[in-house]
Image (cartoon, helix red, strand yellow):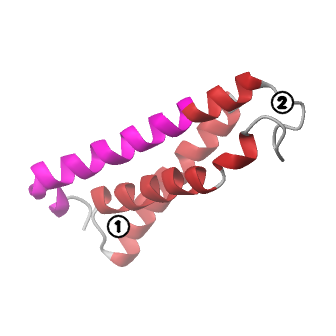
Amino acid sequence: MPTLKNIIYSTLFFLSVTIGLSVFADIAYIYTLCGLSGWVAFGHLITLDDDMPGEWSNPEGIKTIWRTSLAILAVKFAVFIGLVVLVLSAPTLAKYGA
């Protein structure tokens, strides 16, 4: 289960990479955010089976861990899809940060 400390560090990482790629590689903020959120969402999907009851991250078989992991995965994909829809509906966002 993510803690506040992990959420803060993840957010700082996202912001640092987004600003860094914009400054040093001339990549728009929105493209970096889409790429990172897609990477996070699909990475969670690939390792989702580890959170199933009785598996690697949940050997005790606690169903709450499994349900929490599914909910977090849904939020990650919602953010990713939201960013993709935003890029497709407002292509002028691509000029910011590049």
Q: Which residue is mark 1?
A: 22
Q: Quadrant of the N terminus?
A: top right
Label drawn at residue 61: 2
Q: Nearer the viewer, residue 83 or 73?
A: 73
Residue 11 position (above or below residue 69): below
Q: Is residue 72 magenta?
A: yes
Q: Position of residue 16 (x, y in %)?
A: 50, 56
- Percent position of residue 44, x then y: 59, 50
Q: Residues within 10 Å of mark 1 (few under 14, many from 20)?
A: some
Q: CA distance from mark 1 to mark 2?
A: 44 Å
Circle 1 sits in a helix, a strand or a loop, which is it? helix
Outermost residue toward the bottom in this view: 25
Quadrant housing the C terminus: bottom left
> Which residue is more in the foreground, 4 or 38?
38
Residue 66 is situated, as x and y percent measured from the top left of the image, at 69, 31
Identify residue type, mark 1. Answer: Ser
Which residue is drawn at the image coordinates 31% and 70% (left, top)?
Answer: 27
Seen at 48% across and 61% down, the residue is 17
Mark 2: few/some/many CA within 10 Å (<14, 14-19, 20+): some
Over which residues does the magenta segment extend? 71-95
Task: Write down the quadrant of residue 28 in the picture.
Answer: bottom left
Q: Is residue 1 left or right of residue 89?
A: right
**What amino acid is labelled 2 in the image?**
Gly
